[in-house]
Amino acid sequence: MMNRSILGAGLLVAVPAIALAQSPKAATYITDEQVKAVNATPGVDRQIVSVDIGKLNLAVGIVHRGATGAPAATPAGGAAPAGGGAAAAPAEPCGDKSATPAAGGVPGGIYHDHQTETYIIVSGGGTLVTGGKIVNGRRSAPESAVTKVLNGPSCSGAIAGSDVVMKVVKPGDIIIIPAGVPHGWANIPDHVDYLSVRPDPQRTIPELYMNPALKKQ
């Protein structure tokens, strides 16, 4: 049986008509124009696509963060809460518990239970924080964008610990953040834009995805 193709604004994903469980035989192309189109949409962390590559799903997102302290800032890998609707249930605690706040001026961050991320800095820059542990954290809600679209189950909160690394990153830098490793931003002078490549070997986010901005083109 012939493959059927999904075409959206130059994005070509060949999907076997028999079953997605088979190994895909075609590449996925994402143009620079498509990345910029998604990056121009509202929000901070926007998934571009999530595709089945055989033994795992692989997603790519584009993240834009403004200067430190700007209203749009959220923990790395996070997403602004959706407006409207009923009030969300209290978040489940996660991470280490402490009666005293984390010291040292280290900001909040997040870790993902199962998903490794690779950051590719495309413009701007800032001080990225990795390592340590999440203290007095809160788990991402099951129905949140973080859990269902971006990163799967995650834990957000203050970052603390003697093994915290704070490093200035710039365009062209690549950072690999394994699952379970806290990460966040301590200082962004102007902005930072970066691609986030997200393998999902356990398919914790089972649904494949194409950003609506691509479907409209």
Image (cartoon, helix red, strand yellow):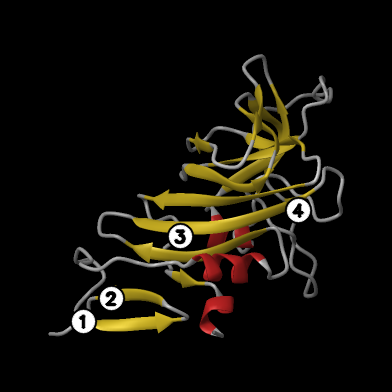
Q: CA distance from mark 4 to mark 2?
A: 39 Å
Amino acid at the residue labelled 4: Pro
Q: CA distance from mark 1 to mark 4?
A: 45 Å
**N-terminal label among 1 and 4:** 1
Amino acid at the residue labelled 1: Asn
- Residue at the (80%, 46%) spot, across then down: 190
**Residue 15, label in figure:** 2
Q: Position of residue 44 (x, y in %)?
A: 70, 58
Residue in the foreground of this view, choosing between 10 and 114: 10
**Residue 205, label in figure:** 3
Residue at image mark 1: 3
Q: Position of residue 69 (x, y in %)?
A: 87, 45
Amino acid at the residue labelled 3: Ile
**Residue 83, label in figure:** none
104 shown above or below 116: above
Circle 3 SS class:
loop
Whether label 2 touches label 1, CB < 8 Å: yes
Residue at image mark 4: 90
Please name which of the two marks, 4 or 3, marks the residue nearer to the observer.
3
**N-terminal label among 3 and 1:** 1
Q: Position of residue 55 (x, y in %)?
A: 26, 54
